[in-house]
Image: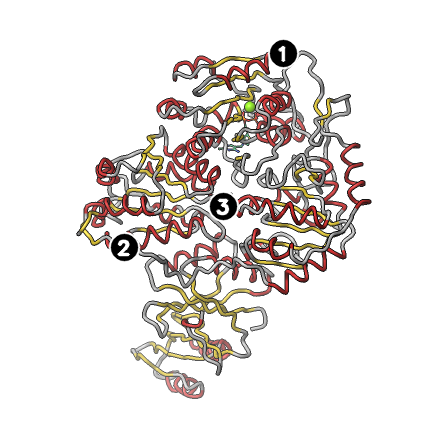
């Protein structure tokens, strides 16, 4: 029996188990939407801005590991998706974006709402398609989902002309893809793995840097096993947070520009770096020529193009983190690095991770710390970008995998609310906290309506410092405190939340923090807390741009409250 | 061509693929010296011959990035030594009654051909490696060059045949 292109697209989504889709319709995608009532299995969630659809799909994907789907009309609908697609590209998040396109005879004529979205997204998608006819749809959908989730995951876009949606074709879903130009290497090369085992056995000060790739491949057990058997301390990247339990005795912090001092010092002092599923981003390495100057490098990554891109690698291993680690673990012999671990511990004591006790003003670090305590470390935390993001990474303790969601590579303000919403839709049984900046929150604030519409119990903590805080911090430290354009006059967030139908409170005093968080947790639906924190609090440590990560600016020395990551 | 590198890239013969490849070079800040695209022995696969400056140390990265394009099926790095490298050039040179004879003589020595004659010019067609095309060009220059069109290189490994099916 023949189906319309729109019906075929819906059938494909069902075959791919992608039955939750986030989007906004318009003329060029209307035939598809018109078909949706025939497919009650598909839950379409109407967002308030297409950027929100893309971030929600990302939040869903990051929280579940499944492919997230967002959908829009042509032209402005499609361009509104772009930021979210770019975000997914930078952080290797599997999403499929479906955009309506003008009818085929109009393509190339600058028709109403025609935009070359496959051209625009060429450098920010893993692959994209302009669908030539309805008969090609099954193959294209099959490939798109396969590409999005396999190998190094990433966004794939399908541009669907309006008349393809009404064209009739046979529907036959292929069981396989045929992509001769795409064969990701999953298994690591045995000889390389053998060499790695030898290098690890010979190292005196080895350290593992665990990245987002470990999270994506779900290699937690394997990583734990390697670290414990070979007694190798583990630092993570920012997006690697949660890939190794942060209360573990071998956990040595996360590294980079705002990483923990001891993590940066440990990496700088190591004689062997075992980098797994990370890409030596400049926020991780600081001055790349002085990064881990004494170390040899083993680099495990599924993307061969990442190996040797930013740092010289002594031993490359291309493969999926989980496969490589489980093969490696068979060759690892138990070892001790007591001296080295004691050294890192000493750095930890000398450079404690602290915040200055409140002198009346509410401190953002304290807020995050309390969030951790009240949620007993069991919440999925989705952050904004900037200071709030760094504090969330520094002061919440992540012991369970897959609980930390943040925009890393692109650093997209406005990610927080829609991504938290998507995460909650994907994992409704979990508590989801959105830690937002007052600036970023206002970039996608309209998704409060979506949250209410879907009755999604997202808990929102705005770290309201009245500034585009991270930029203000740079002005403070590197631009003689000239605060140009960083002061924000926010709206009354409590009133805004209430206008959307979300209960909310404002907290300005440390002693009210706990009760407010408890109230939020007790609430069945969404809840918002506007935390009015100390406006000019800075994030420390900080590696000044261009410096080596061993040269950090640390919190001005005052007696601080030590935030114990370890028991 | 010491610092020149020749990449032979086999790609799906589909709309937009040339754009994907070219865009990747632009995006990674890597200059293309010449690019020639045509069919391969298989109708669904096109063959691109791309000449790049191999001295910048970025070649390996570009190769790997190219390999990530879904439409790129195979990449071969051809060294100039073990490959047959050819370029075709059309050179429109000024020719008067007096100079025509000398031009034809030069063209003959290079086993090039005259493909168009008019009252005041000739179009010379030459095929060969870079040195040959350059030398002919240099010898014709004194007569007055009006126009030049060069294809960029085509290249193929000597002997042991490679084909698209291998991968
Ligand atoms: C979309 C976008 N625009 C601009 C920036 C640059 N930027 C980085 S952090 C930051 C400040 C963020 O302010 P806010 O959301 O209030 O967070 P805070 O740093 O104050 O916690 C800005 C403007 C960005 N990362 N993303
Ligand atoms: Mg702020």
Is A17 on the left or on the right of B26, as rendered?
Answer: left
Mark toward the start of the polypeptide (1 vs 3): 3
Instruction: Residue under label 2, please give it.
Output: A136
Residue A507 picture location, percent across and down: 56, 13
Q: Does A469 appear above or below A127? A: above
Q: Does A545 appear above or below B90? A: above
Mark toward the start of the polypeptide (1 vs 2): 2
Kindly identify the residue that appears in the image at 56 percent across and 29 percent down. Answer: A378
Is A121 on the left or on the right of B51, as rendered?
Answer: left
Q: Which label sits on residue A92?
A: 3
Residue A201 picture location, percent across and down: 74, 56
SS category of the residue bearing label 1: helix
In this orientation, which residue lies closer to the viewer: A176 or A334?
Answer: A334
Is A379 on the left or on the right of A315, as rendered?
Answer: left
Q: CA distance from mark 2 to mark 3?
A: 26 Å
Q: Badge 3: few (under 14), some or many (20 or more) residues near its Cα, within 10 Å?
A: many
Q: Does A435 appear above or below A250? A: above
Q: Which label sits on residue A511?
A: 1
């Amino acid at each position: 029996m023949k189906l319309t292109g729109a019906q075929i697209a819906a059938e494909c989504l069902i075959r791919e188990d992608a039955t939750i889709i986030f989007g906004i319709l318009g003329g060029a995608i209307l035939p598809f939407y018109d078909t949706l009532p025939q497919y009650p299995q598909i839950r379409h969630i109407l967002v308030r801005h297409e950027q929100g659809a893309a971030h929600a799909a990302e939040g869903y994907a990051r929280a579940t590991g499944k492919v997230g789907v967002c959908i829009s009309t042509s032209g402005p609908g499609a361009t509104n998706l772009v930021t979210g697609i770019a975000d997914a590209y930078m952080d290797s998040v599997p999403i499929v974006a479906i955009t309506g396109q003008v009818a085929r005879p109009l393509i190339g004529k600058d028709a109403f709402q025609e935009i070359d979205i496959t051209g625009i997204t060429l450098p920010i998608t893993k692959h994209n398609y302009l669908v030539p006819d309805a008969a090609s749809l099954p193959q294209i959908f099959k490939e798109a989902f396969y590409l999005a989730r396999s190998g190094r995951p990433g966004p794939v876009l399908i541009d669907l002309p309006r008349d393809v949606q009404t064209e009739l074709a046979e529907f036959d879903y292929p069981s396989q893809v045929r992509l001769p130009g795409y064969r990701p290497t999953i298994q690591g090369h045995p000889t390389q793995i053998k060499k790695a085992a030898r290098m690890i056995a010979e190292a005196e000060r080895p350290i593992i840097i665990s990245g987002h790739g470990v999270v994506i491949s779900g290699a937690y057990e394997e990583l734990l096993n390697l670290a414990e058997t070979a007694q190798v301390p583990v630092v993570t990247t920012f997006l690697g947070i949660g890939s190794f339990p942060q209360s573990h005795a071998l956990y040595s912090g996360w590294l980079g520009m705002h990483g923990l001092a001891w993590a940066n010092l440990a990496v700088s002092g190591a004689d062997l770096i075992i980098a797994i599923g990370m890409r030596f981003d400049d926020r991780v390495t600081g001055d790349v020529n002085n990064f881990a100057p004494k170390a040899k490098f083993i680099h495990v990554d599924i993307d061969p193009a990442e190996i040797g891109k930013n740092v010289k690698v002594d031993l490359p291993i291309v493969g999926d983190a989980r496969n490589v680690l489980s093969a490696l673990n068979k060759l690892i012999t138990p070892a001790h690095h007591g001296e080295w671990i004691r050294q890192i511990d000493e750095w930890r004591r000398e450079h404690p991770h602290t915040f200055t006790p409140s002198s009346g003003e509410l401190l953002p670090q304290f807020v995050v710390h309390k969030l951790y305590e009240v949620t007993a470390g069991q919440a999925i935390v989705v952050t904004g970008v900037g200071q709030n993001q760094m504090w969330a990474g520094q002061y919440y303790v992540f012991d369970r995998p897959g609980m930390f969601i943040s925009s890393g590579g692109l650093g997209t303000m406005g990610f927080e609310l829609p991504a938290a919403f998507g995460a909650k839709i994907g994992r409704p049984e979990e508590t989801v906290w959105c830690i937002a900046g007052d600036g970023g929150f206002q970039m996608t604030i309209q998704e409060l309506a979506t949250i209410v519409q879907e009755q999604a119990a997202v808990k929102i903590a705005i770290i309201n410092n009245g500034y585009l805080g991270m930029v203000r911090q740079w002005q403070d430290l590197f631009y003689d405190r000239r605060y140009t354009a960083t002061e924000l006059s926010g709206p009354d967030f409590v009133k805004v939340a209430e206008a959307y139908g979300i209960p909310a409170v404002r907290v300005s005093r440390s002693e009210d923090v706990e009760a407010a968080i408890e109230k939020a947790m007790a609430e069945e639906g969404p809840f918002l807390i506007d935390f009015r924190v100390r406006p000019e609090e800075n994030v420390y440590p900080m590696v000044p741009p261009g410096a080596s990560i061993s040269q950090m600016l640390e919190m001005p020395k005052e007696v601080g409250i030590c935030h114990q990551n370890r028991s | 061509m010491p610092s020149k590198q020749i990449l032979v890239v086999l790609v799906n013969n589909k709309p937009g693929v040339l754009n994907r490849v070219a865009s990747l070079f632009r995006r990674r800040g890597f200059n293309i010296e010449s690019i020639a695209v045509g069919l391969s022995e298989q109708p669904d696969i096109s063959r691109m011959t791309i000449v790049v400056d191999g001295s910048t140390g970025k070649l390996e990265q570009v190769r790997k990035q190219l390999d990530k394009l879904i439409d790129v099926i195979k990449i071969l790095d051809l060294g100039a030594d073990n490959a047959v490298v050819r370029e075709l050039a059309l050179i429109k040179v000024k020719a008067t009654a007096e100079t025509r004879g000398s031009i034809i003589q030069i063209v003959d020595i290079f086993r090039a051909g005259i493909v168009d004659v008019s009252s005041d010019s000739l179009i010379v067609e030459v095929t060969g490696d870079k040195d040959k095309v350059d030398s002919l060009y240099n010898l014709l220059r004194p007569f007055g060059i009006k126009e030049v069109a060069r294809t960029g290189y085509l290249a193929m490994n000597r002997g042991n045949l490679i084909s698209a099916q291998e991968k």
